[in-house]
Amino acid sequence: MRRLHVTAASSVRVRYAPSPTGALHLGGLRTALFNYLFARRHGGAFLLRIEDTDRARAVPGSVEAILGALRWCGLTPDEGPDALGGGAGPYVQSERLPLYAAAAAQLLASGAAYRCFCGPQRLAALREAQAAAGLPSAYDRACAEADPATAARRAAAGEPNVVRLSAPRGGGGSSAPLFDLVLGEVAFPAGAVEDAVLLKSDGWPTYHLASVVDDHAMRVSHVIRGQEWLPSLPKHAALYAALGWTPPAFAHLPLLLNGDRSKLSKRKGDASVEDFVGKGFLPGALLNFVAQLGWTPPGGGSSREGLASLAELAADFDLRDVHRSNAVVDGARLTWVNNRHVRAAVASASGGGGGSDGSGGGGGGGVSLELDDEGAPLLAALRAATAPFLDVALARVGAAGAALAAPTAGAVPARRLNALLAAQHERVGPLRDFPPLVVPFLLRAAGEGHGAAFLNSYLQSAAPAEALGRIAAAAARKAAAAPAVGGGESEAGGAQQQWSQRFGAVFAPLAPPLAALLTQWAGVSEVAFSQGPSAMDAVRRAAELSGTPVGRLLLPLRWALTGLDAGAALGDTLRLLGKEEALARVAAVVARVEK
C-alpha cells in the first residue's frame, strides 16, 4: 500500500509551474489537472507559478495563452500572477531574484555551495576529454576546494563565476532511497547529485535552486509533476537538507507516450490545448480523457465512463490510484469521449432518449427533433461551441457563388439548429464534424429554381462530389460492371466530366423510381410529410411501383437531398428538409437525368 502524505486539509498547497515557452500542451494539462484535483479533493489551494528563468526560450504571449487554456478547461488557479493574486507572490520567478540570491548566499556561508570560475572553454574541453575516455559528462570540482574568502574577493572584483552545489560525497553503489507517492521508494546511484549550477554568472537561478526556494517560500506541501523530473529529485532533496528546510511530498506522474511507444513531445504528437479547441473538442471531454492518462478512477461511475464533472473527478481522485507505468495517448478514445459529451448534451434536452440507429433507412428516425434550451444548459453550450465551425463552413459555401444563400449560424433559429444537432449528433467526434452534416439543410437558392441551384452548385462541390464517387464505386462493384472509381478509362477527363459520368451511372437507372417518388410525395400533406413516416412510406411505394429494391434507392436519394452518403436516418432527413425543399431537390436530379 502506498502511503499518502496528507495532514490537515488546509495544509495542502500544490502548484502547476510551467515555463513560458509556448502554449499549454497535453502533458502540461495533465500535470495541471492532477494538481487541481488533488487540491480540490483535500480542500487545499492550487497555485500557478511561472518559471521564466530560462530567458532564451521564453515565447511572448505564452503566459496569457497558458492562463487562457486553463480557464477554458475550468482549472482556474486559487493563486497566481497578476489578477489572480495571493499571499505568496510574486508568482513569476523573474520577479523573485532576491530570494534566490539570498538562498545562494546561505549555501555559500554554510559550505554547502562554492563559487566556480571555470569558463566556457575549460568546461568544453573537459566534456570532450570525458567523452573521449568514455566517461559520463560531469564537472571535476576544480574549484570546490578553493579558499571561500579568496573566491568571495574574486567575485567582488567582478570576475565571472557561478555558484555550484557542493554535492554530498559518499561511497557505495547508491544513495539512500527517496520516497515518491506514486513510485514508492526510489533508489538513485551515488553520483546522482553532481555539483549542479545553482546561480548563473548573470545572477539568475537555475531550475533546481528556483524551484526549491519557491516551493518552500510558497508553502507547497506536495510537488506533483511528470517523471521526466525524477532525476532532479536527489538534487532537490540535497538542497532542502543543505538549507535546513522540510521538503514537500513528491509524486512523479507516468510519462505520456505516442502509439508507437515513443515519448510524447511538443515536436511529435503533443498537441496544444489550443489545437484541441480548434478541432472542436469540448473542455469536459478533454479533461475526462486527460484524467485517465495514467489514472484509473476507482469502481465505476461517471469518472470511469468519461462523463464526470470536475467536482466528480476531484471526489474520486487519489494519488494511490495513479499508475506507475507510462500512458499511451489514444486519439480515437478522445474522439469517443467527445461524442459521449455531445450525446449527453442532446440527451439533457430530450429526456435522455436515444437516437436513431444511424442506418439511413427505416421510418421517421428515433431522434426527438423538438429540443428546447430551457433547463438544458448543456445543449445551449453545445450549440454555442458549434457555431464558429458552422460559420466557417457556411461562409465557404457563400463565397463559392451567388446561386445559394448561406446564413450565419446566429441567424438560424435555436430550435432549428437544435434539431439539426440532435439528428446528426451520433456521428460527431469533434465539433468540426458537425458542419458537413448540417450545412446542406441550411442552404436555400438566392432566387428561383432552388432545386437546380442546389444540384448545380452545392452537389458539385468537393465533399458531395467525393461522396458521389463512393456511391458510384459501390454500385459498380455490386454490378461487377466497372473498376472502382478513382481511375481507369471509364473516368477519363476533368473533374466536371468525372462528376457527370458518376452522376449518370448512379441516377440514370433510378429515374423511374425517383419520378414515381415525386408523384407519391405530391400526394402527402406538408404536415404529414414533416412527421416522417408518410414521407418514408412514399419512398417504399415508389420503389415497389417501379420494381426497384428499396435498398438500392436509399443511398442515392440521401445524396440527392443532402450531398451526403452517411448521416441522419432518411426519415429525419426528410422531416428536417420539409416537403417543398425535398421535392425541389429530387425533381432537379430527375430533370438532369432526363435531359
Image (cartoon, rainbow, N blue to C red):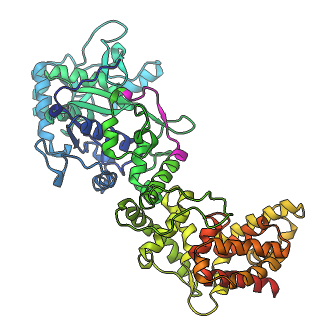
- The spot of residue 116 in percent (x, y) is 22, 26
Which quadrant of the rendered structure holds the C terminus? bottom right
Q: Quadrant of the N terminus?
A: top left
Q: Residue visible at 40% across and 34% down?
A: 297
Q: Return the x and y of residue 247 as percentages of the image width and height.
A: 20, 24
- Foreground residue, 205 or 147? 205
- Which residue is at the front of the view, 156 or 524? 524
Image point (47%, 74%), residue name = 416
Identify which residue is drawn at 12% across, 41% down: 88
Judge whether 365 appears above or below 221 on screen: below
Segment colored magenta: 321-333
Quadrant of the rendered structure where residue 282 is? Answer: bottom left
The residue sitting at the top extreme is 172
Q: In the image, residue 519 lies at what x, y percent?
A: 74, 84
Q: Is residue 304 left or right of residue 315?
A: right
- Residue 212 appears in the figure: yes
Residue 238 x %, y % = 23, 20
Furthest residue toward right: 481
Q: Is residue 350 magenta?
A: no
Q: Is residue 417 left or right of residue 69?
A: right
Q: Is residue 200 visible?
A: no
Single out the residue that lies furthest toward the bottom. 448
**Count of marks, rendered view:** 0
Tell me if residue 129 comes above or below residue 22 in the rendering.
above
Picture layout, residue 427 above or below residue 576: above
Can you say whether 115 is above or below 406 in the image?
above
Question: Taking 267 as reference, is 252 left or right?
Answer: left
Q: Quadrant of residue 571?
A: bottom right
Residue found at x 26% / y 29%:
197
